C-alpha cells in the first residue's frame, strides 16, 4: 500500500532506520513469472495446445458429439447445509484444527462448485472468523492447497494488500482475472489467494475500523469463492506495515513454517508469492521518495507483481520508463481487463452516504453487514471521492 498514508511517514531519502526485509536465503528461488512460448509445450511448435486442459476434464461432461459441458449447480439441494455466522456460537463454528489434514486440498479451478450457486448469499452459511488480537492470531490455511495437481508446474500464492473499505466485486474479480492469466500464460499453478487488509493506523479517508474490514472480506470470500482467504495479521499490527514486510510474513507462514507444498510424490516445493495490485498502486511506486528502493527491489525481484490494468491506464509504458520496474520486468505480469470494471470503494462509500443503492456492486452479505453496523453513513468529503486517487 502507498507508504505516504503511514502517519509516521518519512521520505526514504531522510529515513536511515528502515527495517530491512527478509534475507534472500529465506525466500525460495523461483523462476520469473514469464509467459509460455510454443516450444515449452513439448510438441510441434505449430500445433495448438490441447483443449480443454486435461486437469479440467473431470469437471465436465462429454456428450455424444464429443462436446464438453460444465456442470453448474442450479437447485437448492445442491447447496451445502450450513448455518448463519450471526446465529452460531464459537463452539459450533468450524475450527481449522478440526479439518482432516489427511485429505489433500488441490489448487483452484474455473469450475463452479455447489457452494457457489447464484443465490448462495441468501442461504445461511457459517463463516470462518479471524482473530481480533495478535495473541489469538492463526494463519488461515483452510483453502490453501496442500498438493499440486500438476507436478510440471510451479506453485504460486497471490496476495492482495489494500484498505478494502469496503470490499467490492472488482476486488474479487481481480483474483479471478489473475487466475486466468496465470493459468493461460505461465508455468505456475495457483494454490491459494489472500486478502491482507491494512491496519487502522493507515491514514486514509473513509477507512472503517480494521475488524469491520476484515469481517467484510471474510463474508465476501467465504460466500462467493472456493479458494480465497483473508489474513488478519497486517490488520492487527500496532502500526503501518510496509508491503515488503507483509510479503515476508506470507513467505514465513507458507515456506518457512509449513515447508511449502507437496507434489503428488510427496516432495516439498517452495511456493512463489506474488503481490496482486491495480495500476494505480504501481504508478505510486514511480513517485519520487515514496517507496524505498530496497523495498521495490525486494517486492519485484524476490516476489513479483501481478498488475491489473484500469481504464485509461498505460501500465506497460510506465514499466518501460521506471528503472527498477524495468529491471524486474520478467517478474511482473500485466493483466488486461477484457471486460472493464471500474467499481470504486470510494464511490461506494459516497453512494451509501447519499442513500443510494449499491446492489450488484458488492456482495449482499457485505451490504447487510454495512447496514447492520451503520458503516460509511458519514464518510469523507465529496472532493476526496471525486479525486483521481479514489480507490
Image: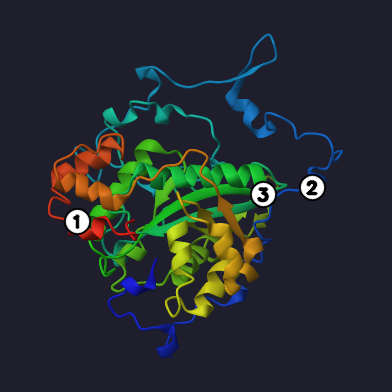
Q: Which residue shows up at 52% across the image and 20% down it?
A: 71
Q: Residue at x 20, y 36 (%)?
A: 357
Tell me which label, 3 or 2, sits earlier in the chain: 2
Instruction: Give the quadrant of residue 281.
Output: bottom left
Distance from label 2 to label 1 (Cα)? 52 Å
Instruction: Establish if 61 lies above or below 234.
Output: above
Q: Which residue bears the numbered disc 3?
A: 186
Of labels 2 and 1, earlier in sequence is 2
Q: Residue shown at 25%/56% (left/top)? A: 385
Please state which of residues 77 and 305 is positioned toward the viewer in this rendering. Answer: 305
Give SS at disc 3. Answer: loop
Reading the image, the residue beneath label 1 is 382
Please, what secondary structure does the residue beneath circle 2 have? helix
Q: In this view, does 42 lie to the left or right of 218?
A: right
SS for tag 1?
helix
Q: Position of residue 371 (x, y in %)?
A: 15, 42
1 or 3: tag closer to the N-terminus: 3
Q: Is 99 in front, or is 294?
A: 294
- Residue 40 is marked as 2
Residue 218, how many percent across, how many down? 33, 47
Amino acid at each position: 500500500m502507498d507508504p505516504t498514508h503511514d502517519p509516521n511517514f518519512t521520505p526514504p531519502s531522510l529515513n536511515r532506520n528502515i527495517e530491512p526485509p527478509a534475507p534472500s536465503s529465506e525466500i525460495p528461488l523461483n523462476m520469473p513469472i514469464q509467459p509460455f512460448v510454443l516450444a515449452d509445450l513439448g510438441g510441434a511448435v505449430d500445433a495448438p495446445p490441447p483443449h480443454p486442459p486435461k486437469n479440467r476434464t473431470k469437471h465436465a461432461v462429454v456428450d455424444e458429439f464429443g462436446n464438453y459441458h460444465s456442470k453448474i449447480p442450479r437447485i437448492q439441494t445442491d447447496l451445502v447445509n450450513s448455518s448463519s455466522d450471526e446465529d452460531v456460537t464459537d463452539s459450533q463454528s468450524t475450527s481449522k484444527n478440526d479439518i482432516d489434514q489427511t485429505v489433500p486440498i488441490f489448487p483452484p479451478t474455473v469450475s463452479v462448485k455447489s457452494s457457489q450457486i447464484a443465490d448462495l448469499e441468501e442461504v445461511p452459511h457459517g463463516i470462518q472468523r479471524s482473530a481480533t488480537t495478535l495473541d489469538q492470531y492463526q494463519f488461515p490455511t483452510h483453502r490453501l492447497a496442500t498438493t499440486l495437481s500438476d507436478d510440471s508446474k510451479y506453485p504460486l500464492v497471490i496476495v492482495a494488500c489494500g484498505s478494502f473499505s469496503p470490499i467490492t466485486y472488482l476486488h474479487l474479480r481481480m483474483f479471478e482475472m489473475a487466475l486466468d492469466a496465470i493459468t493461460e500464460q505461465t508455468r505456475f499453478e495457483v494454490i491459494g489467494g489472500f486478502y491482507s487488509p491494512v491496519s487502522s493506523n493507515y491514514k486514509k479517508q473513509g477507512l472503517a475500523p480494521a475488524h469491520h474490514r476484515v469481517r467484510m472480506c471474510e463474508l465476501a470470500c467465504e460466500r462467493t469463492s472456493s479458494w480465497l482467504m483473508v489474513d488478519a495479521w497486517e490488520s492487527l499490527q500496532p502500526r503501518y506495515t510496509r508491503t515488503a514486510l507483509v510479503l515476508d510474513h506470507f513467505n514465513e507462514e507458507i515456506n518457512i513454517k509449513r515447508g511449502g507444498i507437496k507434489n503428488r510424490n510427496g516432495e516439498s516445493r517452495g511456493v512463489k508469492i506474488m503481490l496482486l495490485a491495480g495500476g494505480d498502486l504501481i504508478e505510486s511506486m514511480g513517485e519520487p521518495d515514496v517507496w524505498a528502493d530496497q523495498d521495490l527491489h525486494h517486492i519485484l525481484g524476490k516476489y513479483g507483481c501481478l498488475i491489473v490494468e484500469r481504464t485509461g491506464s498505460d501500465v506497460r509504458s510506465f514499466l518501460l520508463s521506471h528503472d527498477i520496474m524495468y529491471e524486474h520486468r520478467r517478474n511482473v505480469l500485466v493483466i488486461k481487463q477484457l471486460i472493464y470494471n471500474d467499481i470504486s470503494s470510494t464511490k461506494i462509500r459516497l453512494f451509501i452516504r447519499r442513500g443510494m443503492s449499491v446492489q450488484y456492486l458488492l456482495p449482499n452479505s457485505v451490504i447487510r453487514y454495512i447496514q447492520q453496523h451503520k458503516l460509511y453513513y458519514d464518510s469523507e468529503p465529496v472532493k476526496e471521492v471525486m479525486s483521481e486517487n479514489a480507490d
